[in-house]
Image: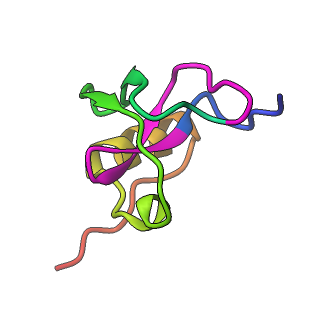
Amino acid sequence: MYRPHPFSWVPAAGARHASAEKRPAGGWSDGTTLTALCDQKIQAESGELAWLWATCPGCSKAARVLAGMPPTAVAR
């Protein structure tokens, strides 16, 4: 499976998290326990609105580092 970055996004705990664990074809089943890039233990969730949840700030920061991107600007 093509994987452009060493992480994948997964909705869990009311937010979009990222995990470095290898994502199975078709995604993670609901309830699968993963370690997110923000160091939280999370359980994968699905549903119509799950992908619209806000992105976890800790995962976003870590994912940008792994992808070689600059940090996001902080609103003042």
**Which residue is at a point 39% across and 22% down the rendered structure image?**
34
Instruction: Name the residue nearer the viewer: 33 or 18.
Output: 33
Q: Is residue 74 left or right of residue 25?
A: left
Above or below for 44 versus 32: below
The residue closer to the viewer here, 48 or 20, is 48
Q: Which quadrant of the figure has residue 58?
A: top left
Against 56, is 35 above or below?
A: above
Quadrant of the image for the N terminus? Answer: top right
Q: Position of residue 35 (x, y in %)?
A: 35, 22
In this figure, which colouring scheme has been used for the structure? rainbow
52 and 75: which is toward the camera: 52
Which part of the image, by quadrant, shows the C terminus? bottom left
The x and y percentages for residue 25 are 74, 29
Q: Residue at x 52, y 34 (%)?
A: 66
Magenta-drawn segment = 9-26
Number of marks: 0
Which residue sits furthest bottom?
76
Instruction: Give the side of residue 58 with respect to residue 4, left or right.
Output: left
* Residue 14, above or below 1: below
| Quarter occupied by residue 52 | bottom left
Q: What residue is at 41 percent from the left and 43 percent from the top?
A: 45
Residue most extreme to the left: 76
Residue at the image position 30 percent from the left and 51 percent from the top: 56
Question: As rendered, which of 69 and 34 lies closer to the eye?
Answer: 34
Confirm whether the magenta stretch covers residue 23.
Answer: yes
User: Where on the picture, by quarter, is residue 8?
Assistant: top right
